[in-house]
Amino acid sequence: MLARLIAAAMSLCLPATTFATNAPTARATDGMLRLYYWQAPTTLNPYLSGGIKDIEAASLILEPLARLDPEGAMIPWLAREIPTLENGGVAADMRSITWRLKEGLTWSDGSPVTSGDVKFTLTYCMTAGSGCAQQAKFRDVMAVDTADALTAVLHFATPKPYPYGPFVGPQTPLIQAAQFSECLGPSAASCTAANFAPIGTGPFRAVEFRPGDTARFDVNPAYRTPDAPAFGSVLLKGGGSAETAGRAVLETGEFDYAWNLQLSPTVLDAMAAKGKGQVVTGFSTLVERLALNLREPAPRGSSTSGPAPIPHPAMADIEVRRALSMSLDRAAMTQIGYGRAGRVTCNIVPGPPAYASRANDGCAAQDIEGAQEVLTNAGWTDDNGDGVRARAGRELRFIFQTSTNAVRQDFQMLAKEWWRQIGIKTELRNIDASVFFSTDPGNPDTLQRFDAHIQMYASASDGTDPEAYLSGWACGNIPTVRNGWQGRNVGGWCDPAYDALLEELSATAAPEDRAALARTLNDMLVQNYVVVPLVDRGRVSAHANTLEGVRMNAWDSELWNIADWRRAQS
Amino acid sequence: MRSARKLRLGVLLLAVAVALVILGPLLWTLPHDAMDLGARNAPASLAHPLGTDQLGRDLAARLFAGGRVSLAVALVAALVGTGLGLAIGLAAGMSRRLDGPLMRLTDIFLSLPLLPLLLIAATLFRAPLASALGAEVGVFTLITLSIGATSWMSTARILRADVRSVMQRDFIAAAQLVGIRPARMVVFHILPNIASTLSVSAALAAASAILMESALSFLGLGFPPDLPSWGRLIFEGTPHLGTYPGRSLWPGAMIAITATGVTSLGDTLRAKAIGN
């Protein structure tokens, strides 16, 4: 039966491929594809794990209704088209979205994919006790109507101008109702057979899964594209380190694809120079930035219910913040710290392209003289000749903290030196990452407490829509004693105009208007020097020269188009 | 004869390390934090005898500057630790009444996990010390005191045993009979007999203080990242062992030279004391 299916599929696709120049000739003709994930997946059910490694491994099998392409644009995957206000897919009151499945879709066991599976997937994740890791994506979904076998209508509790949380991207793919119907609620984690070999719609299906070690896949005979995938089987090897993974692809050629090569630029360049493979980079929204504390740090040991914070006499002066930003050579920092895994950014929202502002591009050039002039014009001068500028008795002495990390310490050294040249004295402090990024309100050394003047860290927007991310700089998001040091507006910047624009964004549905608003908000943050963006950090992977069709994607699973991967013809 | 050669070797190694650290910066005047972004990762040359690091800082200058920090920490921390250990070991060895409580105190300190203790100390005392003594002196005081305060236990134990065995000897009984005061007895009768053990533990304490400081710096609780020490240089260089081995091998060699010098010095002193 299976062989006949494959044969039928092959015979179907043969005439078509004669027109395509680069496409594979037939399904399963290119042998085995070997992937190296140095963090080994522990499950193939993305709903039971927040780990990227698990989500990526599962993306070989399970597919969502829509995906994000390497540019961050939404493309329909199992759905016929992206529902919008214009095509009627999104209701005018923004309280519901209608997804219509492609016709003729089948699971790898041959049964049809229906809107019931969409409804079930939501039920599966939202049933109490399931421990579903993706509940945040479904939070506001009240109910799912299945108008017919191919139409699912999601109803939201509140108007959703951006309704593309559920079933978009690799975190929330469809799972088969028939397979998981016994796995609801607390029994979700104990359904090992289903979690380790889910039935999916993707190009491959699981053959063998050893958690924390190896996974084997073969071709899904019921895959909807007849001439894909080109590879007959996939071996996904886990374990080791980023360095061994890079070696296995770039130096020895044992593997075809190595995932997430977080290596120092010199090490990675040395590997790439062996000529066995290529390094690929994808960028999303992870930005390494400086946050500037506009408030005077409270003295140590002050009472916990102390007075409202007072503005810092130097940091509250925008010219000081401007000078701090102008004197940085972001290109040098990127080259030293990240190499090809980073690119200079002047925006806190660096992508997708429609959301990236072009108004701040001038920041990329270092301007020491300009920064000195800015400070002098603002009245900050070095009168006593100790190399530190002062105004009205207040010297420009700052404490600069970040987590303990080789690249970040290099950045600290560089910034300290450049700031010294413009008459600002910096004291450096590095804090263990587990403390710095902890949310313990009792520890004064955390990111939220910000007991310093300048701090450096990286953060990203979840998905392509930056609304939730940008709302992190609202007045209500300032961490204080009163709210238990919660919130992401660590610098304490507050502008009612910004909050008003955020309000507007939360009621705007048209994508172009949303992008324009997001750019304006980004410009307000960057041009007020609330944050100083430094480097847009990408995801780095490598593939062998014999592997074709890889399109690195930092928005979705890196394996999003694995059905199109093929062996190079030699 | 053998011990004399060993003594010479110890003194020589230590002298080399100390001379490099103290005289090096006088001969090699390049500042350790001057960055030359045009000469990053440069190999050894006349301009940079040991090459430069990833920010174009001269490795030789950093080695000398790091040595000053590391040796100062080692010296002070070893003094504090050995002093505490000596006091407690003497008290426990000479007085039967204090013996039990002091040795239980030692047990308690031995059973405490040291790193978490140091983390707490750093969190609690860093800011007050920094505001009282200035940033760098404050951190130096904190690090040396906390390393010293957590490394006296083995010294105290060993010295107590030594003191007890000395106390059994006839000349002590004779001294007690004559009515010599305890302080005089310690200086003239006990210390000379335990000097060898004392010097060995002091040497070992100095060597381990260097390593402890590097561990603290690595966790971000030691010196700020712009103040190099040998330990920090090693940690910074480890990821580049394959490409630029000199970055961690040179400071590693300096630690090895210093530790070997101090230890063989202590060893010889012990041998001499036994011989006498």
Image: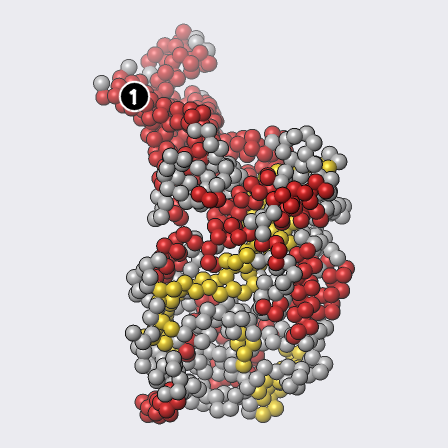
Disc 1 residue type (three-letter)? Leu
Label 1 crowd (10 A; few <14 / some 14-19 / many >=20): many
Depth check, front residue: A343 or A134: A343
Q: Residue at x 74, y 67 (%)?
A: A503
Is label 1 in a helix, a strand or a loop? Answer: helix
Q: Residue at x 66, y 56 (%)?
A: A526
Q: Residue at x 60, y 51 (%)?
A: A290
Circle 1 sits on which residue?
B7
Quarter of the rendering occupied by the C terminus of chain A = bottom left
**Residue B188 is drawn in which quadrant?**
top left
Quarter of the rendering occupied by the N terminus of chain A = bottom left
Depth check, front residue: A239 or A184: A239
Q: Position of residue B204 (x, y in %)?
A: 37, 30
Depth check, front residue: A3 or B147: A3
Q: How many marks?
A: 1
Q: Is residue B29 left or right of residue A515?
A: left
Judged from this view, the residue extending furthest toward the top is B178
Q: Position of residue B21 (x, y in %)?
A: 42, 27
